[in-house]
Amino acid sequence: MANHHPTDSSGTANTILWLGIRFALVLTCVALAAFGFDWLRGQIAFLESDASARAMTGLILAVLVVYAIILAVPFMPGVEIGVALLIIQGATAAPVVYAATVGGLSLAFLVGQTVSLLWLIRVLQDLRLRRIAGWLERIDAVPRADRLTAMQDKLPRWLVPFVVKYRYATVALAINTPGNIAVGGGGGIMLVAGLSRLFSTPATLLVVALATAPVPLAVWLWGVDVVR
């Protein structure tokens, strides 16, 4: 007779619930963004030409800022939302989606790069997130110049090239992987990259700009069919 473990059923139920919440979150964000964009564009159409141009510029900037902030938040499904917006809005949305994606991921990295580790450790300890706080304490205890060597010594040999030598390429691949919300989403990945203090700011911003360009550029040049 087969043994049934309550923990297995509970884990399956939690996984299904998480997937449902994630799907609902993506649909809600995309629906609100698409509806708001279309509604405002319809209102702008009634304005005079000069006023309409100024209003459209303001609309684009507002959408860019809001979407960038959403992308910077850890565990937000940024890749999925961006692709969905491209499918709904088409090639006209490609420049806005690209600019917002670069801005949001860069913002997450810069926050991680500049925030005080000691302050963040205290906040995490107050929130009882002791495992993350302990990880940051171990990072803070190692001088920045020695962190790559320390990481290389602790990792399995087969993982060293990906995490140490080719870390920029690994980050580029991670932020472009659908489903990366499981490891924090694009915003979470870039926040951790900044917190590690193992990445050069100019090089990382360049990597973000290049890594996020192919899909919006393809949609802008050849239309939305390339992502369907």
Image (spheres, rainbow, N blue to C red):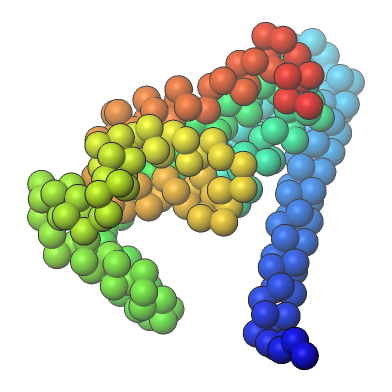
In the displayed structure, does residue 185 sit left or right of residue 32?
A: left
At 30% from the left and 46% from the top, the residue drawn is: 158
At 30% from the left and 35% from the top, the residue drawn is: 166
At 72% from the left and 10% from the top, the residue drawn is: 222
Relative to 152, does residue 81 appear above or below in the rendering? Answer: above
In the displayed structure, does residue 47 sit left or right of residue 124?
A: right
Q: Quadrant of the C terminus?
A: top right
- Rendered location of residue 185, percent (x, y): 54, 49
> Which residue occupies the foreground of this view, 4 or 195?
4
Observer able to see residue 199? no
> Which residue occupies the foreground of this view, 215 or 38?
215
Observer able to see residue 90? yes
- Rendered location of residue 2, percent (x, y): 75, 87
Q: How many marks?
A: 0
Q: Quadrant of the N terminus?
A: bottom right
In the displayed structure, does residue 33 sit left or right of residue 74?
A: right
- Rendered location of residue 197, percent (x, y): 24, 48
Relative to 88, does residue 92 appear above or below in the rendering? Answer: above
- Rendered location of residue 86, percent (x, y): 73, 27
Image quadrant where residue 94 sits: top right
At 42% from the left and 45% from the top, the residue drawn is: 190
Relative to 37, does residue 163 appear above or below in the rendering? Answer: below
- In the rendered image, the residue lying farthest to the front is 1
> Which residue occupies the foreground of this view, 185 or 50?
185
